[in-house]
Image (cartoon, rainbow, N blue to C red):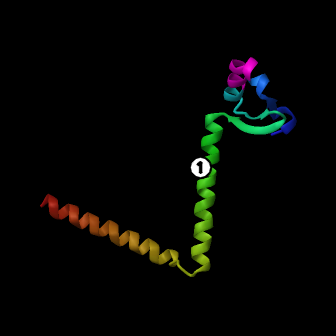
Amino acid sequence: MKFSEAVKPISYLKTHASEVIRDVSENQKTLIITHNGEAKVILQDVKVYEKTQESIALLKILALSGKEVRKGKYRPIEKSFANVKNRIDDFKRGQSEVQS
C-alpha cells in the first residue's frame, strides 16, 4: 500500500463518499482519513479487515504455541496421534454398543 495514494482528508470523504466506498470495496483498498492534518481513522474493505483479523488470530496462536514449547508444555506428535486414534476407537465402540 502506498501511503501517498491512501491518505485522504475528511473533506474529500465528505464530498466523494459514495465513490470512495465503491473504490475501497471493489479494489479491496485501505484509506487513511485525516482530520486537521492528523491521521484519525482507517477506512477498509470488510474482506481485507476479516483477513487481517484472521492473520492476527493465527499469529496469536503461534505466539502462544511458542510460549508453551519454551515452557516444555508439549507432547510428541506420535503420542498426540495415538491419543486421537484411541478417542476415535472409543467413539466407534460406543456407537456400536448403542446400535446393538
Q: Is residue 1 left or right of residue 80?
A: right
Q: Secondary structure at mark 1?
A: helix
- Give coordinates of residue 33: x percent, y percent: 76, 33
For this orientation, the residue located farthest to the left is 100
Q: Please, what is the three-letter code of the amino acid marked with disc 1? A: Glu
Vertical placement of residue 40 versus 100, above or below: above
Q: Is residue 30 left or right of residue 37?
A: left
Vertical placement of residue 46 versus 82, above or below: above
Q: Nearer the viewer, residue 2 or 79?
A: 2
- Give coordinates of residue 53: x percent, y percent: 61, 48
Predominant secondary structure, magenta span: helix
- Give coordinates of residue 16: x percent, y percent: 74, 19
Q: Is residue 86 left or right of residue 53?
A: left
Badge 1 is on which residue?
Answer: 54
**Residue placed at 45% from the left, 77% from the top?**
79
Magenta stretch containing residue 21, yes or no?
yes
Query: Which picture quadrant has residue 48?
Result: top right
Magenta stretch containing residue 73, yes or no?
no
**Residue placed at 28% from the left, 65% from the top?**
91
Q: Quadrant of the N terminus?
A: top right
Q: Residues within 10 Å of mark 1 (few under 14, many from 20)?
A: few
Q: Quadrant of the C terminus?
A: bottom left
Q: Nearer the viewer, residue 20 or 89?
A: 20
**Residue placed at 71% from the left, 37% from the top?**
42
Query: Which picture quadrant has residue 17?
Result: top right
For this orientation, the residue located farthest to the right is 4
Query: Which picture quadrant has residue 71?
Result: bottom right
For this orientation, the residue located farthest to the front is 36
* Count of residue discs: 1
From which residue to which does the magenta span run? Answer: 14-23
Vertical placement of residue 62 versus 68, above or below: above
